[in-house]
Amino acid sequence: MRAAAVEDAARTAPRLLVTERLWLREALPEEARQIAAGDDAGLRWVGDSPSEETQVAARMTARAADAGVHRPGWGMYLLVRSADARVVGAMGFHGPPSDGSVEIGFDLAAPARGQGHATEALRELARWALEQPEVDTVIATTTEDNTPSQRVMERAGFQLLPRRDAEGLLVHRLTR
């Protein structure tokens, strides 16, 4: 019993950011490994399971942890609808900040789209990132044909830059 209590106390608690309708709960590396494998990680998902895009993001977090370079706070967050505790999608960073900048990406389950969840979550996670001393810029990219994601970024206060990234994606930026 005592060993279990010590182990539990040593476990890192996930970061939790709260908005009006959502809990942005950081996925711990073990959860990310489960989600990357297509497992529900003991969570209730809109659509019954994590999407392929969310599994890809979970793999990024799991790989960073496996390589010993995962930094708490700079991985994937689960977007949990507070009304029913269902995961509606995921949002997170492509890695820790570098040269004052951090990149963010997001994915919502199809049944949860068009309800403002992505905008609400993006505002909150970008706000949190810009409060960190090592960040002055948050970047998000999208394809030219992904108009819904572009609108989410615009509503969250991001500005479209006149240049594209190395992969030809549109680049949106939010600064302090």
Image (tube, helix red, strand yellow):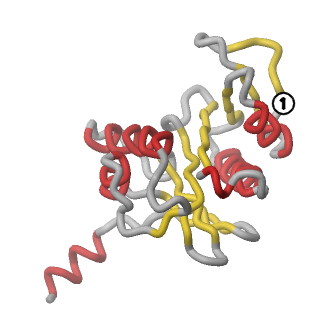
Q: Is residue 80 above or below residue 130?
A: below
Q: Residue at x 28, y 70 (%)?
A: 10
Label total for image: 1
Name which residue type carries label 1. Gln
Name the quarter where the N terminus is drawn: bottom left
**Residue 143 percent across, percent down from the top left:** 68, 23
Describe residue 74's horizontal placement relative to residue 101 as left or right.
left
Q: Secondary structure at mark 1?
A: strand
Describe residue 67's horizontal placement relative to residue 147 as left or right.
left
Q: Is residue 136 above or below residue 82?
A: above
**Residue 111 percent across, percent down from the top left:** 65, 56
Q: Quadrant of residue 8?
A: bottom left
Q: Residue at x 45, y 64 (%)?
A: 14
Q: Is residue 165 above or below residue 23?
A: above
Residue occupied by mark 1: 159
Residue situated in front as seen by the camera: 124 or 59: 59
**Residue 167 percent across, percent down from the top left:** 59, 13
Residue situated in front as seen by the camera: 174 or 33: 33
Q: Quadrant of residue 152?
A: top right
Q: Quadrant of residue 28?
A: bottom left
**Residue 131 percent across, percent down from the top left:** 69, 50
Near mark 1 (Cα within 10 A), the count class, few <14, some 14-19 or many ≥20, is some
- Give the residue at the far bottom of this rendering: 1
Name the quarter where the C terminus is drawn: top right
Describe residue 82's horizontal placement relative to residue 158 as left or right.
left
Q: Residue at x 60, y 34 (%)?
A: 102
Describe residue 138's horizontal placement relative to residue 66 as left or right.
right
